[in-house]
Image (cartoon, rainbow, N blue to C red):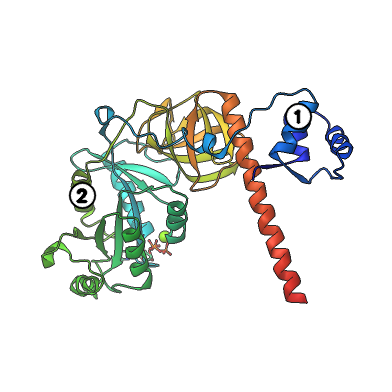
Amino acid sequence: PETITIQELANRMAERAVDVIKLLMQQGQMLKINDVIDADTAELIANELGHTVKRVSEADVEEGLYGEPDDPADLVPRPPVVTIMGHVDHGKTSLLDALRETNVVAGEAGGITQHIGAYQARTPSGDVITFIDTPGHAAFTSMRARGAKVTDIVVLVVAADDGVMPQTVEAINHARAANVPIIVAINKMDKPDADPGRVRNDLLRYEIVVESLGGETLEVEVSALKRMNLDKLLEAIHLQAEVLELKANPNRPAEGVVVEAKLDRGRGPVGTVLVQRGTLKVGDVLVCGAEWGKVRALIDDKGDNVDSAGPATPVEVLGLDGTPEAGDRFAVVDSEARAREIAAYRQRKKRERQHARGVGAKTSLEQMMS
Ligand code: GTP
Ligand code: MG
């Protein structure tokens, strides 16, 4: 059932909480400011105080914000979004760094000035690839659990001197569960004890048959350290992406997912988002998890201000009223009023969840003590 605290109800009506409490008392309810009342009672009180009520139901909020499919005629090709996964120390970060620097060398002089948790690289033939830098396995799973399918392709990094390890298997399972194709990057090929054959064989046990063993999974032997075969890896990603025929409609209000968020001292809340559909523009009003904002600035992965960001583009968003959470979805809405309404609704839901958790924890603690 829908509920609201007395404080929040008062806030929304711009009335004093004490007046709400008085009215409730007249109806025989003795409640305090942080107590929760149901939607019907809240509506009664609001009417009593001369306000008209417009209820925002869960469906109102969630549907219509996301999910209406695009007309196929409006879809155009978009870059693939790639996540790098693998066992601890197998070279995920090194590989991302190497790919990023390769991109700088091939692309803009001056290069990357900051790290935003997601960035774009170019293949030798000029195709753009979007890399997401954050997800560890846990983040990947939690994003998926929240309905944010972020990645199109997983690059599975396996160190040639170490072979398939527990987190390699975890990554395979995550990719499978998400129904995302895997490209195997056999890393650390520069090491004297590198044994790529063993990696290939190990993978067979998990039903990954790489191309050189007659299977369909693309594989590339690389060295992040020596920058060996990075172009080949980018091309493999491009090839895989072509098979997927990734498309999106750039001409609609933007939707996407928060990859990373932080509270910056000078700039306020900063969300790194990945646009998944539509085009995000400066001046757009968006809801982002339980926060909302009017886009004050968009900053790309090179640290440059941009006016807009289309599908599969990562950008930093400035102008949010609070810090969202990684994995939160965002959507552009048509008015500030609507954005506020949805954000307030979600804030309330969030508090209710937190409250429920708090109560649960207390109960179990009490049980433990008795
Ligand atoms: P976690 O984030 O801790 O899971 O590790 P990671 O997978 O990101 O590995 P990281 O890139 O931090 O590399 C781990 C170690 O392996 C570092 O000491 C790297 O210098 C080394 N390393 C990474 N790639 C290569 C490579 O291609 N060759 C060699 N010889 N060493 C490498
Ligand atoms: Mg790392």
Whether residue 325 can be seen here: yes
The residue at which mark 1 appears reads as 46
**Of the pair 285 and 314, the residue shown nearer to us:** 285
Residue 118 relative to residue 343: left or right: left
Q: Secondary structure at mark 1?
A: helix
**139 in relation to 50, above or below:** below
Q: Position of residue 96 (x, y in %)?
A: 35, 53
Quarter of the figure with the C terminus: bottom right
**166 and 28: which one is in front?**
28
Point 76% across, 29% down: residue = 46
Q: Residue at x 67, y 55 (%)?
A: 356
In the displayed structure, 334 sits above or below 96; it is: above
Label 2 CB-ligand 1 distance < 8 A? no
Find the distance from the CA under tag 2 to the CA under tag 1: 57 Å
Residue at 24% x, 76% y: name it: 193
Q: Residues within 10 Å of mark 2 (few under 14, many from 20)?
A: some
Label 2's element? helix
Which is more foreground, mark 2 or mark 1? 1
Q: Quadrant of ligand 1?
A: bottom left
Residue 326 location (% of width, % of height): 50, 48
User: Which numbered dot is residue 240?
Assistant: 2
Q: Which quadrant is the N terminus positioned in?
A: top right
Q: Please tell me how crowded label 1 is: few (under 14), some (14-19), or many (20+) other residues with Cα within 10 Å.
A: some
Where is residue 95 shown, x and y percent of the image?
A: 32, 56
Residue 297 in the image: above or below residue 82: above
Q: Is mark 1 within 8 Å of ligand 2?
A: no
Q: Reading the chain from its start, which is encountered first: label 2 or label 1?
A: 1
**Residue 267 can be seen, yes or no:** no
